[in-house]
Image: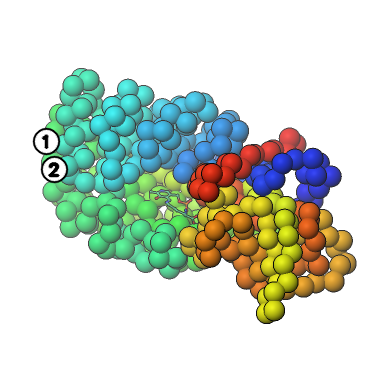
Amino acid sequence: MTAFPVKEFATLRTPFYYYDLALLRETLDTIQACLAEHPNYHVHYAVKANANPRILQTIAQAGLGADCVSGGEVLAARAAGIPASRIVYAGVGKTDEEINAALDEGIFCFNVESLPELEVINEMAARKQVVARVAFRVNPNVDAHTHEKITTGLEENKFGIDMTDLVDAIRQAEAMPHVAFEGMHFHIGSQIRDLVVYEHLCTRINELQDMLQQHGLQPRHINVGGGLGVDYDAPDAEPIPPFSAYFSLFARCLQLREGQELHFELGRSVVAQCGTLIARTTFVKCGHARRFVIVDAGFTDLIRPAMYGAHHFTQNLSAASDAATETYDVVGPICESSDVFSRDEVLPLTRRGDLIAFRSAGAYGEVMASTYNCRRLPEAHFSEN
Ligand code: LLP
């Protein structure tokens, strides 16, 4: 069990995110140890999962690149020390300002999601007399078997281009003097725990590569996106996701061509387990049918339960470990009925003032916080060792 410095927490204003930097470094070391076995593999950390400067700097120091989805993320990655040569930039709606800024930075690659976007990148690169490296995001129509709001690889959604349009898109890119076609990009969804899904993705990519070969085409790199999931139910049982199984699956199932590089965009699996949202119990309310633990964090601090029906492993850090238990609904203070962390949560008898920890909150937690209801954004604190 993770031991939290509860005494130290007593002096801090709640709610706040607490990041275990030692666990983050251990996670990054595990990734790097896997990559050492595959010199042609490259990991771009998906900045969208957590853009806290300390977290980004720690990731930059470990030598990972960045996967960005806005001009702001490109700048945050650069400010943290991630070299432009390791930045990929995706997104269906890149604005002129964002494309210009990314061209000025000289990023590694634009993950292009449509032909109109390709034309605009070509025009803007022409004005600057540069050549932009591009990869096409291809919709592989592989079911990620995950929550509908975070499935992206199925047909008919706003992301990427259709597989059947790929050759035509590459031909158009080749005819444009200021873009260089470099790769194919895929992303099938997030919080993927069943790795078999990635075998399906590999099969689809192998078929596409065969098809491209028949047209005399071979991308320099393949980018398989992110999506590796974490154990939200038992964060202490699996603090570091199964990276070795994940990378070796691609080594086994993906038929890379001579000289091809393989790129990954991992977000959640890098940062989820190192972060915890710490809240304080404001009131315990006993209704006729239910008991409520009302905490001072709400969906403005951690939106995943309200938005995706997610459950974060919940602990009362103030109660004695042998305390009697009770069943509660754990809720926030926001004036909306969706502001619920969990229902029927079994916790030690909880009192006003008790500290409550919502675990595995390092990914898509702090970064999705809002000031709705004129609330303060949560602060962040870090373990130093
Ligand atoms: N690459 C692309 C193109 C993506 O769209 C995403 C995530 C990633 C990489 C990183 O995926 P990861 O390794 O983190 O699964 N807010 C939601 C998750 C949204 C994911 C969006 N795209 C949540 O809290 O579950």
Residue 95 found in image quarter: top left
Say left or right for 159 vs 129. Answer: right
Question: Which of the two residues, 168 or 256, is positioned nearer the viewer here?
Answer: 168
SS for dot 2: helix
Residue 363, percent across and down?
55, 49
**Three-letter residue code for mark 1:** Ala
- Residue 21 in view in this figure: no
Q: Quadrant of the N terminus?
A: bottom right
Question: Can you give x and y, in whole percent of width and height, for residue 292 in the image?
Answer: 69, 68
Q: Which residue is denoted by mark 2 in the rendering? A: 171
Q: Residues within 10 Å of mark 2 (few under 14, many from 20)?
A: few
User: Is 123 situated above or below 308?
Assistant: above
Q: Residue furthest bottom?
A: 289
Q: Is residue 197 above or below residue 25?
A: below
Q: Is mark 1 within 8 Å of ligand 1?
A: no
Asked whether, in this view, residue 217 is left or right of residue 187, the answer is left
Q: Nearer the viewer, residue 384 or 288?
A: 288
Residue 103: x and y in percent read 30, 26
Task: Residue at 17%, 42% (x, y): give it.
Answer: 116
Nearest the eye: 268 or 285 = 285
Looking at the picture, how far across and down is residue 189, in whole percent?
41, 58
Look at mark 1 in the image and give the residue it sits on.
Answer: 175
User: Element type at marker 1?
Assistant: helix
The answer to whether the residue labelled 2 contacts the one labelled 1, judged by CB atoms less than 8 Å apart, is: yes
Q: Tell me if I can see residue 97 in this picture.
A: yes
Residue drawn at x 44%, y 46% as measured from the top left: 265
Q: What kind of residue is marked 2?
A: Arg
State the residue at coordinates (81%, 67%). 349
| Rendered residue at 67%/47% (across/down) | 15
Residue 289 sits in which quadrant?
Answer: bottom right
Circle 1 crowding by C-alpha within 10 Å: few under 14, some 14–19, many from 20: few
Which of the image's four quarters has the C terminus? top right
